[in-house]
Image: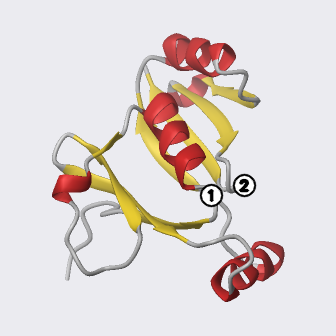
Amino acid sequence: MAIHGIDHINIDTTKPEETIEFYGHVLGLENRPEDRPDGIGPGAWLFKNDQAMIHLNFHEPGSDAAAKLADAAKSGAFNHVAFAGSDFEGTCETLDELSIAYRVNELPSINLKQIFVRDPNNVALEINIRS
């Protein structure tokens, strides 16, 4: 069996609109409800071209699922998601315009610039831009 890359990331959220907007503005992903299968519960799939890169599961604040989500955020081993990106300056400008905090790291020895940011659910994202 061979692995060819990440198929998708799945995120549980009690902040559906904020999360969809964040990934739309920051990563350029598109919410396409018409392309999401029926019968899989409330949520959204966020696309880049034909790839549903992020799957969102919506949970009502105060629900049992939301309480489990809060507990998982305290003790989970998940660290971050890394994306391959482009347009370092443009990405930083977009984050500045949206008043979203981020930090950068440059690794000139391997021609890599990195942007680190958190989504509305406190999921850590790493955007790697190679020159």
- Secondary structure of residue under mark 1: loop
Amino acid tagged 2:
Asn
Residue at the image point whose x is 79% and y is 82% from the top:
71
Q: Is residue 79 left or right of residue 36?
A: right
Q: Nearer the viewer, residue 16 or 10?
A: 16
Dot 2, crowdedness within 10 Å: few (<14), some or many (≥20)? few
Dot 1, crowdedness within 10 Å: few (<14), some or many (≥20)? some
Marks counted in the figure total 2
Q: Looking at this rendering, what residue extends furthest in the right direction?
A: 74
Q: Compare marks 1 and 2 and give the one earlier in the sequence.
A: 1
Q: Is residue 1 left or right of residue 80?
A: left
For the C terminus, which image quadrant? top left
Residue 52, percent from left and from top: 27, 55
Q: Nearer the viewer, residue 12 or 110?
A: 12
When asked about the image quadrant of residue 37, the answer is bottom left
Q: To which residue does mark 2 refer?
A: 122
Is 31 located above or below residue 110 in the figure? below
Residue at the image point whose x is 59% and y is 11% from the top:
93
Residue 83, percent from left and from top: 46, 45
- Secondary structure of residue under mark 2: loop
Q: Is residue 32 left or right of residue 104?
A: left
Residue 127, percent from left and from top: 53, 37
Residue at the image point whose x is 30% and y is 63% from the top:
7
The numbered mark at residue 80 is 1
Depth check, mark 1 against mark 2: the one in front is 2
Residue 11, percent from left and from top: 53, 65
Alpha carbon separation for disc pair 1 and 2: 10 Å
